[in-house]
Image (cartoon, rainbow, N blue to C red):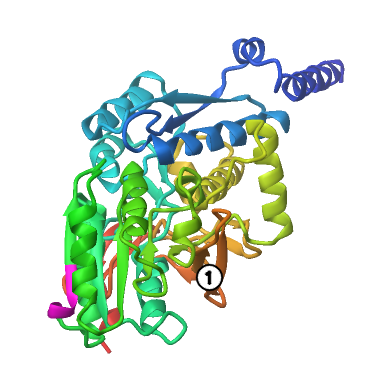
Amino acid sequence: MTKLLNWARAAAVAAGAIAGAASAGPAFAQAVTPIKVGVLHSLSGTMAISETTLKDTMLMLVDDLNKKGGLLGRPVQAVVVDPASDWPLFAEKARELLAQQKVDVVFGNWTSVSRKSVLPVFEELNGLLFYPVQYEGEESSRNVFYTGAAPNQQAIPAVEYLMGRDGGEAKRFVLLGTDYVYPRTTNKILRAFLNSKGIADADILENYTPFGHADWQTIVSQVKQFASAGKKTAVISTINGDANVPFYKELANQGIKATDIPVVAFSVGEEEIAGLDATPLVGHLAAWNYFMSVDTPENKAFIAKWHAFIGNNKRTTNDPMEAHYIGFNMWVQAVKQAGTTQVDAVRQAMYGQKFKNLTGGVAVMNTNHHLSKPVMIGEIQANGQFDIVWKTPGVVVGDAWSDFIPESKPLVADWTYPWVCGNCATPKFAN
């Protein structure tokens, strides 16, 4: 009994130390081995405009968890590296996090080319990556949880909206993208989808530019010329990073208004618009699964917590931030359920995890490593926020493999036993 009482007292002291150590920082970290969370986001280079905020989001989430007592009786430590928008460097930094820093999980990446760069590292070392940004699909890894949108949760619904009455009944489409895997693969899917809806290739203009592209005068002129054919034309933008700033400026310079040629963007949110004069962009669109303007108690609380943490009430929130918020909290739940941070155990515990999203619904992690989430179309307002003009009535299950690419249509990802496969052919489309 004496030993039991002594153990109980020791446990109480340890619990008190954990609760009070959230603000103690280094002293607490020295007393108890921390759980390490890797943060793999560009803090310099062309993608810093988008990714720096995600690093800050992860620091906020880790700080909040430590204030609640940590995880499994241990503090949580964010280990931040800067891959500097350099795609090969992403792989080096991922290996550093997993092999040298011995992190338990990694949250990071934005572009698909950076994700493709780190994928072999995570699979070789059996690391766990939570990827928070919309992507092109056509991939399924047991080492990645894709918390951003798949094409059926963003690109396809956005084009359907533009083709519908509410979206202006577009008949011609301009596909503008940065020259890497996400835009090219997404547009391959969109071209096949448009063809299936009777849109001929002659009514589709496709163009790609390098990261950081700045001179948009010629391309925007080509868009105007293409749109002069008499059919309603819309632009689908998969332009990434800081190239969006001169692109939207050139639209305004050439007098392109949303009422004439609407642009729907898949990589432009509140953070990117914050660096622009939004007045000429009013009416242009973006497709996401979250907007800062969503009016829910959960979103209001998240925004308040973000402003308090960052110390700036003018800082915006955006969709990939919500993806990190959902992914991180699901990971915490899975670790608690598994009773360990061991990757194989946590991965199994992730399946079926549910967590309230910020838009008033519940996100679910499916066995294909994709979330169920709503889809929204937002219209840019003069204040840089979005007015939500359309949304799905419920959540949409993310699909790793597109139904519009013949070689992908029969494939399914299911990482539960006895499937344990990311690209297995099934008879589900036989009918």
Return the residue at label 1: 395
| Left or right: 410 as drawn, with respect to 387 | left
Dot 1 amino acid type: Val
Instruction: Specify start and end residues of the magenta stretch as a single range.
Output: 201-205
Residue 287 image position (x, y, % from top left): 44, 64
- Front in this rendered view, residue 400 or 196: 196
Q: What is the quadrant of the N terminus in the image? A: top right
The answer to which image quadrant residue 363 occupies is bottom right
Residue 93 image position (x, y, % from top left): 32, 26
- Front in this rendered view, residue 119 or 126: 119
- Front in this rendered view, residue 419 or 391: 391
Residue 276 in view here: yes
At x 30%, y 53%, the residue is 239
Residue 74 image position (x, y, % from top left): 63, 25
Q: Residues within 10 Å of mark 1 (few under 14, many from 20)?
A: some
Toward the left, the furthest residue is 202
Q: Is residue 307 above or below residue 263?
A: above
Q: Is residue 110 above or below residue 98?
A: below
What is the total number of numbered labels drawn onto the structure image? 1
Q: What is the quadrant of the C terminus in the image? A: bottom left
Secondary structure at badge 1 equals loop
- Front in this rendered view, residue 151 or 66: 151
Residue 71 in view here: no
Residue 413 image position (x, y, % from top left): 32, 62
| Left or right: 256 as drawn, with respect to 389 | left
The answer to which image quadrant residue 399 occupies is bottom left
At x 59%, y 45%, the residue is 329
At x 67%, y 54%, the residue is 299
Check residue 319 for magenta coloring. no
| Left or right: 164 as drawn, with respect to 394 | left
* Secondary structure predominantly adopted by residues drawn in magenta: helix
Q: Is residue 27 above or below residue 352?
A: above
